[in-house]
Amino acid sequence: SYELTQPPSVSVSPGQTARITCSGDKLGSKYASWYRQKPGQSPLLLIYKDIKRPSGVPERFSGSNSGNTATLTITGTQTMDEADYYCQAWDSDTAQYVFGTGTKVTVL
Amino acid sequence: QVTLRESGPALVKPTQTLTLTCTFSGFSVSTSRVCLGWIRQPPGKALEWLALIDWDDDKYYSTSLKTRLTISRDTSKNQLVLTMTNMNPVDTATYYCARTPVGGAVGDGFDIWGLGTMVTVSS
């Protein structure tokens, strides 16, 4: 089955840039989405179709996807961005949605 | 305002069948060309996709759970239903329903989520 792997944790200082990676076989040939989930809350879609931001999502969130890796970049990270982040892709070969393993972002 | 709200039992016994309902409002599945799906999250663990139904009523299931799942939609009631048979303690999780963006395609991310409903499987 298709798998997406993320680093368990990423630390970043306030105001700096955080990059969260998501690795999967030929992921660049699929569309990737990214979510932020704070404790006790539902996931929030940040990026879909690799680079699109839903209405209301701040511009400091951006995405890229090439080769085997998709990346979520948070520019000017804020303390409110401390949360778990998940990537997600659609595996058209098996008609499956796949979520990544999740990354805990700490802002300190 | 677009909303999704999950409902169902908080506690089920092992081997029982779970039935969850998601009541949605603020959009029409057919005219908006959206998909509706179920995702779950065991306590402290990652998200896991379960099933999806698109605007044409085509259904997609997690390979690992396919034999236990049935997804359906009642257009007249604006409800999405998931049944999962032979429940096991490892199925203890928060179950979410979610929607894809308007005018998108199968495989797009989920832009609207319900608050989730916690289901515990225990005797």
Image (spheres, coloured by chain):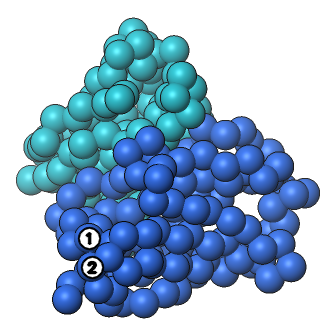
Q: Nearer the viewer, residue A12 or A3?
A: A3
Q: Quadrant of residue B109?
A: top right
Residue B15 vs B72, above or below: the answer is below
| Residue found at x 44% / y 41% | B63
**Number of the label disc, if any, that sits on residue B14:** 2
Q: Nearer the viewer, residue A77 or B6?
A: B6
From the viewer's perspective, tell me whether residue B89 is left or right of residue B11: left
Task: Name the N-terminal-most of marks 2 and 1.
Answer: 2
The residue labelled by disc 1 is: B88
Give the letter of the cyan chain: A
| Residue found at x 44% / y 23% | A64
Q: Position of residue A65 (x, y in %)?
A: 44, 20
Q: Position of residue B118 (x, y in %)?
A: 34, 81
Q: Quadrant of residue B45?
A: bottom left
| Label 1, residues with CA under 10 Å away: few <14, some 14-19, many ≥20 | some
Whether residue A53 is visible, yes or no, is no
**Number of the label disc, if any, that sits on residue A67:** none
Q: Nearer the viewer, residue A62 or B27?
A: B27
- State which quarter of the image contains the N terminus of chain A: top left
Callout 1: SS: loop
Give the letter of the blue chain: B
Q: Amino acid at mark 2?
A: Pro
